[in-house]
Amino acid sequence: MKLVRLNLPDGRVMECPSGVTVAEAMTEAGMDTRDAAGAMLNGRAVELGRRLAADARLDPIALDSPEGREIHRHTASHVLAQAVKRLFPGARLGIGPATADGFYYDFEVERPFTPDDLERIEKEMRRIVGADYLVTRVEVSRDEALAIFEKRGEPYKLELIAELPEGETISCYEQGEFVDLCAGPHLRSTGAVRAFKLLSVAGAYWRGDERRPMLQRIYGTAYEDEASLALHVERLEEAKRRDHRRLGKEMGLFSIHEEGGPGLIYWHPKGGVVREIIEDFWRREHRRRGYDIVYSPHIAKLDLWKTSGHWDWYRENMYSPMKIDEVEYLLKPMNCPFHILMYKSETRSYRDLPMRWAELGTVYRYERSGVLHGLLRVRGFTQDDAHIFCRPDQLQDEILGVIDLAEFMMRSFGYENYEIMLSVRDPAEKAKYAGDDETWAAAEAALKGALAERGIAYILGEGEAKFYGPAIDITLKDALDRGWQGPTIQVDFNLPERFDMTYAGEDGRLHRPVMIHRTVLGSLERFFGGLIEHYAGALPFWLSPVQVRILPVAERHHGYARLVAARLSASGLRVEVDSRSEKLNYKIRSGELDKIPYMLVVGDKEEASGGVSVRKRGQVDVGVESLEAFEERVKAEARPASHP
């Protein structure tokens, strides 16, 4: 009998017969498998039913770990698919992966699913879980896999099988009468699926291609216990309350109009005020740090984008060319080639460097209609773009300067938590990236060096780099601990080469500058959407479009209300008077819905004393104050969080 050696987490080495399952080996080792979703064998996740064939290191995967939750949710997606096939026998299966906080499965059905359908499907899922079907992995040949899914009438599975590399092991998973094409791993049985809930249904194009059939995507989530599930559902409800699309409409900040085109944002006066505040703050801080502000056109000749490489590497995200005087032009998806042309407009010396140029440049990128989402995924947006041209010996200091600026901006807008990824190219797919190995190594080393000097922890994202260079990508964490795309810092040796950029060195010879692409806010639209959700619409005082609303109790108090408004406006506050002939309680409720930081009630008593009755957002009543005292109260709040 062949024996295999297992290295266990506690340092023990155990021998067991080849062919026993992972679960049997764990039990023999005295491990509790009840809360295990699977195990890691030599760093690869497998199910408890996998049979041991060779020596390995074995580490249990807890059900409440990230890997365990992924296995749990993946199994739940198969239970969902089995339930749909039972209730809708004509449904055809798409794909059903686990996601960061749940799972989904795509189906082709005759009609869209309804809320009542979701209830029926969830009940059937509970029956399948109660039946506790064993989940079994079966490895088959390509021909066998094609026969299985052709017999079952599953064209989407046949398409996936046809694209698998020749000679690759094809695995299916069986549970009861249900069979699915899948790489796994899965829980040992359907009964091991614990707390789950179906959440919603939406349309989704097959493989994200709008030229392919529209399928129905059912979303759900699963957790290791009911308490964790309830907490997640509560967070989802809170996310709905914070949805920037709803709040943006209620607060009169922005709108989107299908007749004008999807993915294009219309900033209303109040939203425009917030944008102006953000832009002015951005400009002041950039000038303070040695940046010059530039402006560039919205279109350019197609040849410019061929030189930059965007036409070859980024074409699917660009709009089609337009002809002007028989020459093809493109709407710009990026600002960088324009800044390069400005750099090349005259001879540069080593003494001129570094040059820091910043632009709030509006760009246009084609996004499929299915992924457009309020302010977060749009087709036209303004990017707080900047490019730094420097000498190689200046590179690391310039990267450190951008990191400092990015951290300052995040703190200013109230983001204290974030994650950093060093996005590098995939060494196995170098053909996807412009430039040679030496260039990429130098760029990645510069970013690593800057992070190391600051002592900043990061995760390595292989394959996450842009085609022209690696980057530091920062993900902001909001009040619900959700991630939002934030600052990015990219080092680029390639575009200076493609555009033959030079500077005269101290030795009198021509040298190549290094180019840093960076944003510290990203898209203003996406950043604003994130702010709305981070603060649930209750923007900080310094960002609020209306900082103070004055509520006269009766018409006879309108004159005093206007005097108070004029006094506060002269102090630089953004003030409005609610002069509607409504009851005071209605005006207060309206101000609460509009997220006004301060409401000042003025009636006979206030007018007589020359004061105001203060209501602060989130509090019932602060009390009566003099105007001088109120102005002193809000003075500190009128500055960003990062300012003393």
Image (cartoon, rainbow, N blue to C red):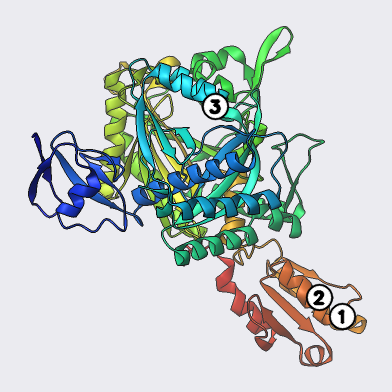
Q: Are marks 1 and 2 in contact (CB under 8 Å)?
A: yes
The amino acid type of the residue labelled 2 equals Lys
Compare residues 569 and 299 and report the one nearer the observer: 299
Q: What is the spatial separation of the Cα atoms under label 1 and label 3, in whole angstroms?
A: 67 Å
Badge 3 marks a residue whose secondary structure is: loop
Q: Nearer the viewer, mark 1 or mark 3?
A: 3
In the rendered view, does 166 fall on the left or right side of 118?
left
The amino acid type of the residue labelled 1 equals Lys
Instruction: Say which residue label 1 marks.
Output: 583
Q: Earlier in the sequence, mark 3 or mark 2?
A: 3
Residue drawn at the location 64% of the way across and 19% of the way down: 330
Instruction: Check the image and report above or below for 252 versus 267.
Output: below
Instruction: Say which residue label 2 marks.
Output: 587
Q: Are marks 1 and 3 in contact (CB under 8 Å)?
A: no
Q: What is the spatial separation of the Cα atoms under label 1 and label 2, in whole angstroms?
A: 7 Å
Compare residues 442 and 292 and report the one nearer the observer: 442
Residue drawn at the location 79% of the way across and 38% of the way down: 258
